[in-house]
Amino acid sequence: FIKGEIERYFFDLDYSAYVIEHFPYMEFENSELADRFAHTVDRAYERGNAIGLSDEEFRMEIANAFNEWLG
């Protein structure tokens, strides 16, 4: 999605499924990384949807959050 390879609709489906499936494992394996994910990427995702960002604005919001999460 960040690179423009999939549409937002499919990103939403993939993101939700990925978080539901993998976040509990991330918390168990590295709670600091999981906490940082929740406060960067997931917060950006929820905020972007809540305030109705355009697809391009949302893409930039998620890209910035991923960069922050990865350090």
Image (cartoon, grey):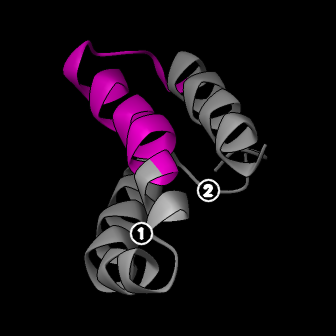
Residue 60, compared with residue 37, is above or below; it is above
Q: Quadrant of residue 27?
A: bottom left
**Quarter of the rendering occupied by the C terminus:** top right
Residue linked to disc 1 = 14
Q: Report the front residue among 50 and 71.
A: 71
Residue linked to disc 2 = 6
Query: How packed is label 1: few (under 14 Cα within 10 Å), some, or many (20 or more)?
Result: few
- First along the sequence among labels 2 and 1: 2
In x, y percent, where is residue 18? 40, 75
Q: Amino acid at mark 1?
A: Asp
Q: Amino acid at mark 2?
A: Ile
Q: Quadrant of residue 64?
A: top right
Residue 71, compared with residue 30, is above or below; it is above
Residue 54, compared with residue 36, is above or below; it is above
Please provide the residue range marked out in magenta.
36-55
Label 2 – label 1 distance at C-alpha: 10 Å
- Residue 68 is labelled as none
- Number of callouts: 2
- Residue at coordinates 66% horizontally, 43% vertically from top-left? 66
Residue 51, compared with residue 65, is above or below; it is above
Query: How packed is label 2: few (under 14 Cα within 10 Å), some, or many (20 or more)?
Result: few
- Residue at coordinates 46% horizontally, 56% vertically from top-left? 11
Q: Report the front residue among 21 and 53.
A: 21
**Magenta region, mostly helix, strand or loop?**
helix
Q: Is residue 50 magenta?
A: yes
- Residue at coordinates 25% horizontally, 75% vertically from top-left? 20
